[in-house]
Image (cartoon, helix red, strand yellow):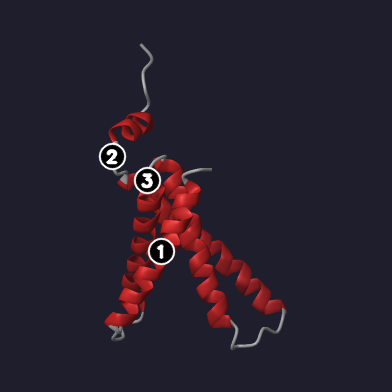
Amino acid sequence: MVRKTRVEEDVVRKVFRWDSVLAGVVAGYLTSLVCSAVLGAIMLKTTIAQETVPSIISGVGFLSIAVGSGYAAMRSRWAGWLHGATTGALYVVASVLISLILFPEPLNAVVIVERTVIGSVVGLVAGAVGVNL
């Protein structure tokens, strides 16, 4: 009898893998950290218009969610869309909590829900792609 690994058993039993989601969130934050460092170096050496910086930062956030969600889906090996969407939502919620700790200002609940939905959709798409890689 061939012994199956834990991941193979989870795929057969269709178990939601929270460890994959958390690993995806960490991968997303590492991606964000690396992209922010590269962006900082580029901004130091060039003259980027201040108006473009928020768009670039949003792009880094979306890229980070996509990388983290794809990674979570690859690790889970099934239901990539679900693992990806959950990773995207947790990434946004964790970002909001971190910003509340560092910058205690009132936040608009509609904006938080909007960002969480967008993060979930980006994660869903990336997870659907990532599970097939």
- Res 29 visible: no
Q: Position of residue 68 (x, y in %)?
A: 46, 55
Q: Which residue is mark 2?
A: 15
In this rendering, which labeled residue sits more in front, label 1 or label 2? 1
**Spatial separation of the CA atoms under disc 1 and disc 3:** 14 Å
Check the image and report above or below for 106 versus 84: below
- The tag on residue 79 is 3
Q: Which callout, 1 or 2, points at the residue further toward the start of the chain? A: 2
Q: Which residue is mark 1?
A: 121
Quarter of the figure with the N terminus: top left
Point 48% across, 56% down: residue: 126
107, 120: nearer the viewer: 120
Q: Residues within 10 Å of mark 1 (few under 14, many from 20)?
A: many
72, 126: nearer the viewer: 126
Q: Position of residue 56 (x, y in %)?
A: 57, 76
- In what element is the residue under mark 1? helix
